[in-house]
Amino acid sequence: LENSSNMAQRVTASDGNKKTSRVRVAVRLRPYLDKEDEKGEGPCVRGLDKQNLEIVNWRNATETVKYHFDAFHGAKTTQQEVFVLSVKPILSHILNGQNASVFAYGPTGAGKTHTMLGSAEKPGVIPRAVREVFNLVNAKHEDEGWDYSISMSYLEIYNEKVLDLLSPNSQDLPIRQDKDRNIFIPGLTSMTISSFSDFDTHFVPASLNRTTASTKLNQRSSRSHAILLIKVVRTSRVLPHRQQTGKLYLVDLAGSEDNRRTGNQGIRLKESGAINLSLFTLSKVVDSLNSGTSVRVPYRDSKLTRLLQDSLGGSAHSVMITNIAPEYKYYFDTFSALNFAAKSKMIVNKPFTRETMAVPVLPVKRAREEHEAGGSGS
Ligand code: ADP
Ligand code: MG
């Protein structure tokens, strides 16, 4: 054992970050909602095809900025399509002792929880992924010689504190690394589950708890990272009963909105700082994994990235679904989410929606123009 772990270290050290895998980046645009657009300005973002979208350029309304991603899921994309295209392909790996992670990133109100959790009528990534893991395990043939066992943990990172959502009065838990470089949380509840309904029995009350707490505590759900861990352990039926563990993290991240602009103070400001630290570090980690350069991956700089260290980059399979909203009130948060997520961007010289809008303008600019118009009655 000691040998193999030394070897793993040597491989990592000599190959630098060349061995680390990219984080696949998908963007999902939620449908336009009238109630989010009091001024009736229409959408400021639109999809172009399966990998590209464009957004009005606030510096120059006759231009749009065009972004390219691994995948773009337009407003009409169903929950099933998001799952099949962006999540399903990585799930088989966790049966082979590899790790995987799926994140929903984006500003509050853009559809992270809809994407991850969904509703009874439109179940999201979490219920679909858990069902699929059971399907994959149940489809395994006896003669492959492995026994599988599946367990779940559910936690929250709030204010850089790690809290067990399956244990109501949990205190801040530590994050540790074992000699094989696996990350674990001593004391975190782990429940063996043998079916999807078993999962639901534990998960539903825990996520309801979280929602109830959130309304009391300043929309805590938008300020904390909710992390579901599904662990698949397989044990060889023959001696020496070799064991492999695969982990799947399903993460509904805190809102990526810039809290400095919303004027938070006191405890809220402290929270914002902590949220910014985790999300800021996540963005640095994703950037350094995806840039292909040999810069240090700063996993240790926040609780979130430290916890995900063995399941994000490296030999793990990771997908980040960036959720965005099309209304102008989200414009700057959308812009910063896209800049975080984009593989590339390009300014395109053409008006956004020539057919339906005379000149697409930003709320700020429009307000100024209305002021300048000075009640001329136009
Ligand atoms: P977040 O978790 O990012 O704050 P939510 O998932 O709560 O955002 O979404 C905000 C609102 O938009 C909710 O009412 C949700 O039902 C709705 N919504 C989000 N995405 C979609 C979608 N793809 N289709 C329909 N409604 C959506
Ligand atoms: Mg949410």
Image (cartoon, grey):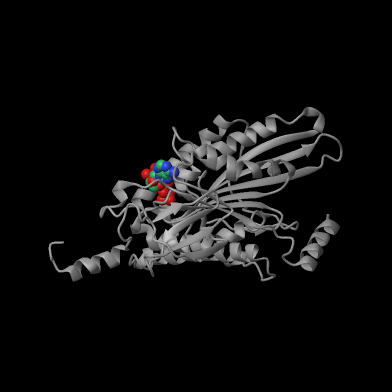
Q: Is residue 87 above or below residue 296?
A: above
Left or right of 373 on screen, residue 98: right
Q: Nearer the viewer, residue 347 or 135?
A: 347
- Would you say residue 278 is visible in this rendering? no
| Quadrant housing the N terminus | bottom right
- Would you say residue 237 is visible in this rendering? yes
* Residue drawn at x 29%, y 62% as measured from the top left: 363
| Quadrant housing the C terminus | bottom left
Which picture quadrant has residue 230? top right
* Residue drawn at x 34%, y 46% as measured from the top left: 33
Q: From the top left corner, tell me how far across and down residue 141 is, in percent.
A: 76, 29
Q: From the top left corner, tell me how far across and down residue 377 is, in percent.
A: 12, 62
Q: Nearer the viewer, residue 80 or 172?
A: 80
Q: Is residue 295 above or below residue 234?
A: below
Q: From the top left corner, tell me how far across and down residue 48 is, in percent.
A: 49, 51
Left or right of 128 on screen, residue 58: left
* Residue drawn at x 72%, y 58% as measured from the top left: 181
Q: Nearer the viewer, residue 253 or 348?
A: 348
Left or right of 27 on screen, residue 62: left
Q: Nearer the viewer, residue 177 or 316?
A: 316
Q: From the top left corner, tell me how far across and down residue 351 is, in percent.
A: 39, 61
Q: Is residue 305 above or below residue 228?
A: below
Number of marks in the rendered image: 0
